[in-house]
Image (cartoon, helix red, strand yellow):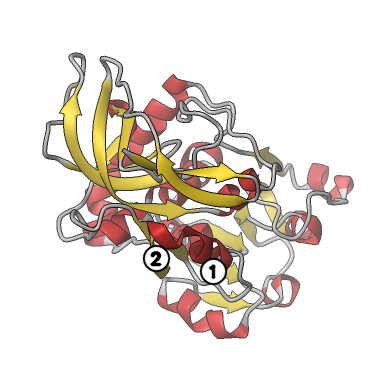
Amino acid sequence: MHALVHRGDAWVRTEAADPVPGPADVVVSVAAAGLNRADLLMRSGNYVPTGADWAVPLDRVGFEMAGRVVAVGADVTGVREGDRVLAQTGGACAELVAVDHRLVLGVPDGMDWTAAAALPSALLTEFDALAPAAELRGGERVVITGASSGVGLVGVQLARALGAASVVATTRSTAKLPLLRELGADTATLSLVDAVEPGTVDVALDHLGGTALADLVSLAAPGARIVQIGRLAGGRSTIDLEALAAHRVRLIGTTFRGRSAPELHALVARVRALLPELVERHGVHAVVDSVFDIADAEQAAARLDAPGVTGKVVLIVMASLA
């Protein structure tokens, strides 16, 4: 088969050995794969995946994909050959991927390969932050910083679908404000402190870090939960510990790196149970910025790194399926 791998600071499509599945694995013929900023960090040497969902050499590219099951292991239940599936898994930019069947989700009816490939990482990241981590309750007020990222755009939709009373979404781009409102944000803003009154944030998903995290602590309501997901605005922050203590704020860090297999299986099972309702009733979807053939992976990387990117960059891996 062919797979995308790191060669120095470039991505190269090359011959690779077919995956050897375990008894709990399915083999997926990959139609399309989504790209993430973590892919760029990996090729620059600034990110090393260590989660149980990364079971391929570290030179392989890709964290999420969608395709059709072509083989199932002896211990697999609930997934059959021929099923359309999507999954977050390591080395996703390849013609064939072996993945534990407990990590796959069925592609919802009517969803094409491109949309399916763009969904897994954002969906799992934001659901994990809102539900298990922040324990979002119906009627609470949510703030999402860096909401115009591919992950954040799904977070806005999930917050509404999971019962938030209001959603405030931040972006650095005036051009992206209408999209955030269209996806469910009550308030889309360039300035968090100008749009939110102190003491009114129940749950926050922070994709920025830096000064944005400090602002969220100062705006938190009593008992607020702030989930720190990304560091797009910086990996260091100085926060007001008096405000943190006075408002009994829970500051929660999260990453999929280092997660055990049972943790990941449990998360995917929760999402699997809700996926039809989230997609069909609430319309949760990934926003796709652009689509490239895997032969044009370097162009895709440049687009992923561009300041104006809105949503996910997707690679077509096998055009015969897509």
Label 1 belongs to which residue?
A: 303
Figure quadrant of the C terminus = bottom left
Q: Residue placed at 76% from the left, 54% from the top? A: 217
Q: Position of residue 99 (x, y in %)?
A: 33, 29
Q: Residue placed at 80% from the left, 46% from the top? A: 244
Label 2 belongs to which residue?
A: 292
Q: Residue placed at 54% from the left, 72% from the top? A: 309
Describe residue 44's horizontal placement relative to residue 134 as left or right: right
Front residue of 256/187: it is 256
CB of mark 2 within 8 Å of CB of mark 1? yes
Front residue of 156/81: it is 81
Q: Secondary structure at mark 2?
A: strand
| Dot 2 amino acid type | Phe
Figure quadrant of the N terminus = top left
Describe residue 65's horizontal placement relative to residue 124 as left or right: left
State whether residue 226 appears in this view. no
Q: Position of residue 81 (x, y in %)?
A: 12, 33
